[in-house]
Amino acid sequence: MAMALARAFDGVVINADSMQIYRDLRILSARPSPEEEAEVPHRLYGVLDGDDICSAARWRDLAKAEIAEAQSAGRLPILCGGTGFYIKALTEGLSPMPEVPAEVRAKIRAEVAASPGVTAWDRLQNLDPVAAARIEPMDMQRISRALEIYAATGRILTDWQNDPLDGPPPGLRFLTCVMVPPRADLVARCDARLDAMMAQGALEEVGTLLARGIPPDRPIMRAVGVPELSAYLAGQTSFPEALAQAKIATRRYAKRQATWAKNQIIPNFIVNEKFSESLMGKFFAFIEENGLIQV
């Protein structure tokens, strides 16, 4: 859909996916192909190293710069991606978060790294159960962040997040489209996409990523499919089992995306079917009627 919009309205497709921003996993993160990127302008795809960390606040700043550049060139900015929190951070703003001193960050991260199993998550659970409920027990980056904020300020993450949002960028207006195809279609597409990724070299891509020795707390190491294929490459499971588990993880992620969008996003336009040529006229008319382009 983003490609169709960009072709029709002289648009720029701006990435809003937390994994596609990294250059290391073009195949497994389903980044646009080089041919697609050459056909219409794409921004924020593969621009960060896998050893880097991109927060929602950092992505928002990058996206705001790309939106401004697109507008100055007379192009329509089209934000596209599956990280709903990124979209929400841009369109609604974020709760102001404190700066954490480097020495506090280093101390907490060392403690978390030395914690066996889910000990660090248990620590967060005792301190801030609301935040812990939203964080996977082995998501060491987000656990560390929550603990760092408390260590630096004496105030838990949930309290900071309950502060008023800082609002969207001034002068910008957003129209939001949520695509929620039928579950059966979505499941079939998830499975077929992962099979296609394997044929395109996703396993080799993960092997190259692992060879870099990137710390396990980096976001890219939790990309859907990386833990499952890593287990196979480490000899911990068979390839059929790794592929089956990666497909399960993909389907679960897609379901979480749909649930999150339903509860967190108030869309201007909902597509409850697979994108097709027949949808284009309806959606294009919606864009024109809402004044995002000059007709």
Image (cartoon, helix red, strand yellow):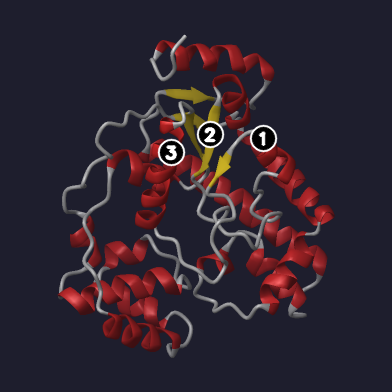
C-alpha span from label 2 to label 3: 10 Å
Q: Which residue is mark 1?
A: 184
* Residue 211 picture quarter: bottom right
The residue sitting at 68% across, 59% down in the picture is 246
The residue carrying pointer 3 sits among few (fewer than 14), some (14 to 19) or many (20 or more) residues within 10 Å by Cα, namely some
Question: Which amino acid lies under the numbered mark 2 shown in the image of this protein?
Answer: Val
Q: Quadrant of the N terminus?
A: top right
Q: Which residue is mark 3?
A: 69
Q: Are marks 2 and 3 in contact (CB under 8 Å)?
A: yes
Query: In this view, which residue lies farthest toward the front?
Result: 73
Q: Is residue 69 toward the left or the right of residue 145 in the image?
A: right
Amino acid type at mark 1: Ala
Instruction: Determine the CA span between mark 1 and mark 3.
Output: 39 Å
Describe the element under mark 3 as helix, strand or loop. helix
For this rendering, which residue is in front, 267 or 173? 173
Q: Earlier in the sequence, mark 2 or mark 3?
A: 2
Estimate the x, y position of residue 287 in percent, counting from the top left: 46, 17
| SS category of the residue bearing label 2 | strand
Q: Amino acid at mark 3?
A: Glu
Residue 37 drawn at (x, y percent):
66, 41
Local packing at callout 2 (Cα closer than 10 Å; few below 14, some 14-19, many 20+) is many
Contact? badges 2 and 1 (CB < 8 Å): no
- On residue 12, the disc is 2
Q: Residue at x 57, y 67 (%)?
A: 50
